[in-house]
Image (spheres, helix red, strand yellow):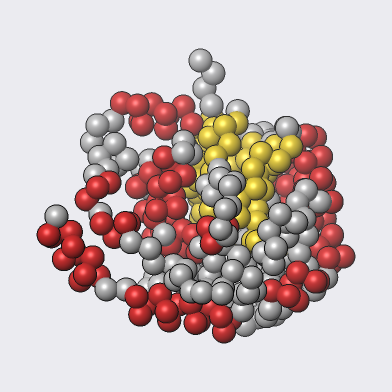
Amino acid sequence: MEHIRYSAAACQTDQPNPVDRRGMRRNTDRLLSIIDSAVAGAAPFLPVKLVVFPEFAHAAPVFPTAKELIEKLAVEIPNEHTERIWEKAKELNIYIQTGSMLEVDKKYKNALFNTTCLIGPEGILYKYRKVNTWIPYEVHTSPHDIEGYDEPLFPVADTPVGRIGTAICYDWLFPEVLRQLAANGAEVLLRVSAYMDPWNATAPMDWWTIINRCRAIENTAYVVAANQAASLKNYPPYSWSGGSQIVDFDGRLLADASPGPGERIVVAPIDVTALRHERSTRRGHSFIAHLRTEAYPVYRKHFYPPQLKDNDEEMLSYEKNNELIDESKRQIDFRAVNAKDSEN
């Protein structure tokens, strides 16, 4: 059996954010150049076969309403950017997790998705649409919230470099997301993020590092986490912490970009064969095999979004997100959930 071992590159970006679709071309130009640098830098060593970019590397939500974002920045997928990245993947025989872009799809009225694609020599292997939007600020649509949505929420691609799954930024604060990707077969978990200060890679608020290592440990999976590293000037009102990381399946930090703004590429080995051996042979710390799913009644109750009448066609806004959050909080009664479980 062929031993699957290669290098992955987590690539930080620091570019002015486009304010129209034409401006996205400049960002894609730079991403293609970074890909060339990542592959060339590792060529004499363990070759790079997987390249990962941050959230909003193509376009950030620089307008406050979904209507403006749809009019000025949103694109359908596939598009000129995914086509150019596909050409690069074919040229270099690698797999590329794109930065996210704002996506519209004619199938879903008024929906605006935050979407990233895994692209290999074969083409687009999946689209991942952010399930847990960073509310109340983000006015994107979660595919989870669309009635009748029939596409996989957590797709996993089986590739020559392993089984790969992705989640975007705030998704990673929900361990259920990465657990579902692992249950769907993912061995390498990709984090496409725009994580800002103060929740960065350093103490005392090192959420970024803690979450990356925890999700690797919980799921016996590699984590390749690419973070936005834009300066405060390029993407106010936040400064962006960078600190892109690669973590092995036991939570060891294999590579780490120093926090702070600025382009960086960090590279580390991914040994899929070793991971598969661990998953198949270890009995201790085999967390999915040890999972007592029925023990958690909290998952039998619906929390978000709250079921409000006449809400289906309304476009999201900061104000609407706050209304939904407040209503969801009013409906939460953890004591009632626990009491019901005790009665059973």
Tell me the residue at 64%/36% (across/down).
Answer: 49
Query: Residue at left 44%, top 50%?
Result: 178
Asked if 128 appears above or below 323 in the picture, the reply is: above
For this orientation, the residue located farthest to the top is 1
Question: Would you say 325 lies left or right of 257 here?
Answer: left
Question: So how many labels did they put on this image?
Answer: 0
Viewer-nearest residue: 320 or 131:
320
Name the image quarter holding residue 320.
Answer: bottom right
Q: Is residue 281 above or below residue 39?
A: above
Quadrant of the rendered image containing residue 341: bottom left
Q: Foreground residue, 297 or 157?
A: 297
Q: Is residue 260 above or below residue 296?
A: below
**Which residue lies at the image location 34% right of the left edge and 47% below the top edge?**
218
The quadrant in which the C terminus is found is bottom left
Query: Which residue is at the front of the view, 274 or 55?
Result: 55
Q: Residue at x 22, y 50 (%)?
A: 295
Image coordinates of residue 161 in percent, x first then y, are 58, 32
Tell me if I can see residue 322 in this picture: yes
Along the horizontal axis of the image, is 28 left or right of 229? right
